[in-house]
Image (cartoon, grey):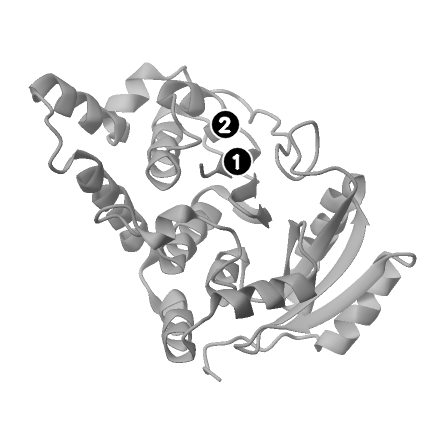
Amino acid sequence: MTSFLRPPALPAEELLLLLREWCPEAEVARAATDTGVDVVGVRVPSERARDVWETGRRRHGETGWWPYVTSASPERVAEYHARRGCDAAEWERAVGEAVCQDHDARAASVVVSVFRWSTQGLPFDDEDFQSWRDDYDPDRLAPLLGPAVVGPRLGVPRWAIGSSAISSGMRWINLVAARGGYEVPVLLPHLYSNPNWFGHGDRCLTPLDDAALLRRWQEQWGAQLFFATGPYLELVVDRPPLDPQGAAQATTELFAYCDDTVQNLVGTGDGMARSTMWSLWWD
């Protein structure tokens, strides 16, 4: 097992006991992936999911386990990863690289590579090409956005809870031993099904790209992994950018990562980018 895996402060058996204290009537479960990653979870009504997640996030420093909300039990997570398969040596290398990589540089390279992929070989005239370039340039987007605001927009979970939820009823809050939520997509490479991982043309984002962007967003704007299932991802954002330049930068990176969701850059820059919840979906 790779030495870059972080041993949690609290053993899995003790975490199960703690979850029973948090949610006395709830079902709890534990499973391990074929690469040895423990997943411990508690199943609660969807209206309680945010509160239980917040408790897990608040206690992360003492437990070493990062929570995320999902529709899949720990057993289903382990079964799904086994079915999709994983090269153990490649996985260990990726875990190590996720810890050591320059995440800001890798995040910037994602934006550049996606722009190149989007424009390569297409019959654009100069005006069309300039339009595409503008989409990826925060300095050009910022003047189109509204002025700085005094406080963030209140974001509401779109996929995890509410009228657009994947399904109503119950949710699992699964916990994984990790330094932060940004490591979870590497520890669980099929955490959410970003179809771009499997490549379109020369574009192929990987879990290391996910880790780089999630870590950058966590450090820059306090964005934390909240919900992940299927092609859906939601982040709770503690310090979203409030000024046009910061909102333009966040929008550009979100657009490069998930243009299925970010189709109106001005709308996103004035809306979701400045809110406390980022909801992404891949078609």
Residue 8 image offset from top left, x and y in percent: 63, 74
Q: Name the residue under label 2.
A: 272
Q: In this view, does 205 lie to the left or right of 12?
A: left
Determine whether the residue tagged by mark 1 lies in a helix, strand or loop.
Answer: strand
Q: Quarter-wise, where is residue 234 in the image?
A: top right
Determine contact: label 2, label 1, CB under 8 Å: yes
The residue lying at 77 percent from left, 77 percent from top is 13
The residue lying at 14 percent from left, 38 percent from top is 120
- In the displayed orientation, state which residue is furthest to the right: 25
Residue 62 image offset from top left, x and y in percent: 68, 67
Please tell me whether residue 135 is drawn above or below residue 182 in the rendered image. above
Q: Is residue 112 left or right of residue 5?
A: left
- In the displayed orientation, state which residue is furthest to the front: 83
Please tell me whether residue 268 is drawn above or below residue 89 in the rendered image. above
Please tell me whether residue 229 is drawn above or below residue 130 in the rendered image. below
Q: Nearer the viewer, residue 229 or 21?
A: 229
Please tell me whether residue 188 is drawn above or below residue 152 in the rendered image. below
On-image quarter of the C terminus: top left
Residue 35 image offset from top left, x and y in percent: 52, 77
Give the residue type that dot 2 points to.
Answer: Met
- Mark before the other along the chain sequence, 2 or 1: 2
The residue lying at 41 percent from left, 16 percent from top is 147
Q: Quarter-wise, where is residue 79 in the image?
A: bottom right
Q: Which of 8 and 120 is in front in this view?
A: 120
Residue 134 image offset from top left, x and y in percent: 22, 25
Give the residue type that dot 1 points to.
Answer: Trp
The residue lying at 37 percent from left, 17 percent from top is 145
Q: In this view, does 249 lie to the left or right of 21?
A: left
Determine whether the residue tagged by mark 2 lies in a helix, strand or loop.
Answer: helix
Q: Which of 94 and 59 is in front in this view?
A: 94
Q: Name the residue under label 1.
A: 278
Within 10 Å of disc 2 (Cα), the crowding (few <14, some 14-19, many 20+) is: many
